Image (cartoon, helix red, strand yellow):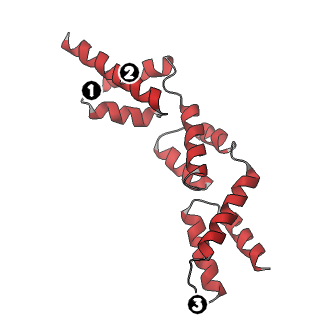
Amino acid sequence: MAENALFRTALNKAMALCSRREYCIHDIGEKIESWGIGENDIKKIISILIQENFLNEERFARAFVKDKFNYNKWGKIKITLHLRSKNIPGDIIRKALDSIDKELYIRTLRDLISGHRRFVKAKNQYDLKAKLLRFGLSKGFESSLIYDLLNDTED
């Protein structure tokens, strides 16, 4: 009886969490495990959450991409790496990344680079480009886009 009550409590707590914000299976599984729930019960809870539409990997991936791009100004590479670390399937990641507007993506990179350029101290043009390239890469943008942008602004 106590086992059933513990399961019910964990399920209700997980439902409450998932109703407040998006979670992926990986994250909610870790959260439930931290409550001391057994592996079989975790699988049952996750199954119920999916059936009741509290958990949806595609919805999570879309929300994650939107938030990380719009608020953190992350590029597609960094977003992909973080989603992979949460065991999100590649096809879901690709679909979510396709929702980013290409023009907005390039404009965001341009704004980030030009904003960072004002604060960078460099000895010469080569040093400046290297620092801006490293900055763009650290934000998760593709090197080819950064090169193109740096070469366009030079002209």
Residue drawn 62% across and 60% down?
141
For disc 3, the neighbor class at 10 Å (few under 14, some 14 to 19, many from 20) is: few
Q: Are marks 2 and 1 in contact (CB under 8 Å)?
A: yes
Which mark sits nearer the N-terminus, 2 or 1? 1
Q: Earlier in the sequence, mark 3 or mark 2?
A: 2
Looking at the image, the residue that sits furthest to the top is 1
Q: Residues within 10 Å of mark 1 (few under 14, many from 20)?
A: some
Tell me the amino acid under the disc marked 3. Answer: Lys
Up-down relation of residue 26 to residue 97 (above or below): above
**Percent x, y of residue 149:** 73, 69
Residue 95, compared with residue 15, is above or below; it is below
Q: Give me the C-alpha separation between circle 3 and circle 1.
A: 57 Å
Residue 45 tag number: 2
Q: As shown in the figure, which amino acid type bears the numbered disc 2?
A: Ile
- Looking at the image, residue 125 sits to the left or right of residue 33; the answer is right
**Percent of width and height locating residue 37:** 27, 26
Instruction: Give me the C-alpha separation between circle 2 and circle 1.
Output: 10 Å
Q: Secondary structure at mark 2?
A: helix
Q: In this rendering, is residue 71 above or below 121?
A: above
> Which residue corresponds to mark 1?
37
Which mark's residue is nearer the viewer, 3 or 1?
3
Q: Is residue 40 above or below residue 144?
A: above
The tag earlier along the polypeptide, 3 or 1, is 1
Which residue carries the number 3 mark? 123
x, y percentage for residue 8? 31, 16
